[in-house]
């Protein structure tokens, strides 16, 4: 049985096509699962370091899927042949790193109908803001429990830039009534409260007040009678 995490299973559930590019594959558990489960015909699996690719090679051999997965040593999409790619998964990285990968010149092909599945470990608000400002629409987002509660989002390029509030960058398209969303938001609020307290201790009262207003906006969104994704 392939040891795939709930995070990666959630990513797999958001795929649409049959030729997948997995950026930062690490041990290649996702590609091995996709091929073994018949959810993809071919996978390009990349990593920026040779060590993880060596581990990935062992995984593919162990589960007998080596013929259907191409391993590429690449910084983001730099050495990826985009021909035929229907879906891109970028999981297990910080939101800022995912943003930088998507913003690179080598990623231009993702604007041609490619389905994006993104799973930031940190700084998801940075990624959401960049997507909205650069013509990408998040069409689906869900919280998933792993070692902590994380978010997985599905996005595609529309070319339409959409203004978002700072609060919206923290909750995105998450389902407000999902119990895991509440846990996810609670973790964010804890981080923001710590930030506000630190600013107060440093005598930056205006900055602290701004963070507390942000917390209040996020709390308002969580209310059952507020507008937003149910």
Image (tube, helix red, strand yellow):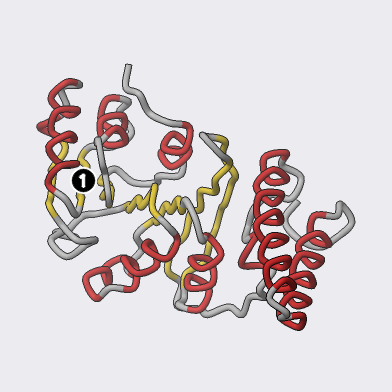
Which quadrant, please, contains the N terminus?
Answer: top left
User: Crowding near pointer 1: few (<14 within 10 Å), some, many (20+)?
Assistant: many
Residue 177's spot in the image, x, y percent? 76, 45
SS assignment at label 1: strand
Residue 197's spot in the image, x, y percent? 73, 65
Q: In this image, 179 relative to 17: left or right?
A: right
Task: Check the image and name the residue furthest to the right.
Answer: 225
Residue under circle 1? 45
Task: Check the image and name the residue furthest to the bottom.
Answer: 206
Number of numbered discs overlaid on the protein picture: 1
Tell me if residue 193 comes above or below residue 38 in the rendering: below
Residue 72's spot in the image, x, y percent? 12, 50
Q: Residue at x 21, y 70 (%)?
A: 106
Quadrant hosting residue 75: bottom left
Q: Residue at x 27, y 52 (%)?
A: 23
Residue 13's spot in the image, x, y percent? 46, 38
Task: Check the image and name the residue furthest to the top.
Answer: 1
Tell me if residue 14 comes above or below residue 67 in the rendering: below
Q: Residue at x 41, y 37 (%)?
A: 8
Q: In this image, 138 relative to 157: left or right?
A: right
Q: In this image, 54 relative to 153: left or right?
A: left
Q: Residue at x 35, y 50 (%)?
A: 89
């Amino acid at each position: 049985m392939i040891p795939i995490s709930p995070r990666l299973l959630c990513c797999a559930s958001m795929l649409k096509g049959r030729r997948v590019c997995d950026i930062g594959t690490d041990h290649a558990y996702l590609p091995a699962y996709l091929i073994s489960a018949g959810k993809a015909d071919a996978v390009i699996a990349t990593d920026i370091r040779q060590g993880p690719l060596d581990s990935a090679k062992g995984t593919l051999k162990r589960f007998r899927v080596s013929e259907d997965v191409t391993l590429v040593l690449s910084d983001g999409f730099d050495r990826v042949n985009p021909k035929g790619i229907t879906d891109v998964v970028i999981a297990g990285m910080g939101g800022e790193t995912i943003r930088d990968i998507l913003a690179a010149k080598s990623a231009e092909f993702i604007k041609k109908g490619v389905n994006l599945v993104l799973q930031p470990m940190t700084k998801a608000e940075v990624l959401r803001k960049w997507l909205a400002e650069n013509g990408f629409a998040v069409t689906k987002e869900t919280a998933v429990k792993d070692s902590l509660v994380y978010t997985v989002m599905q996005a595609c390029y529309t070319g339409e830039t959409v203004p978002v509030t700072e609060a919206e960058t923290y909750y995105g398209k998450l389902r407000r009534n999902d119990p895991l969303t509440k846990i996810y938001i609670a973790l964010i609020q804890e981080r923001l409260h710590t930030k506000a307290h630190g600013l107060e201790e440093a005598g930056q009262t205006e900055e602290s007040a701004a963070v507390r207003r942000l917390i209040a906006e996020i709390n308002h969104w969580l209310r059952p009678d507020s507008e937003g994704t149910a």
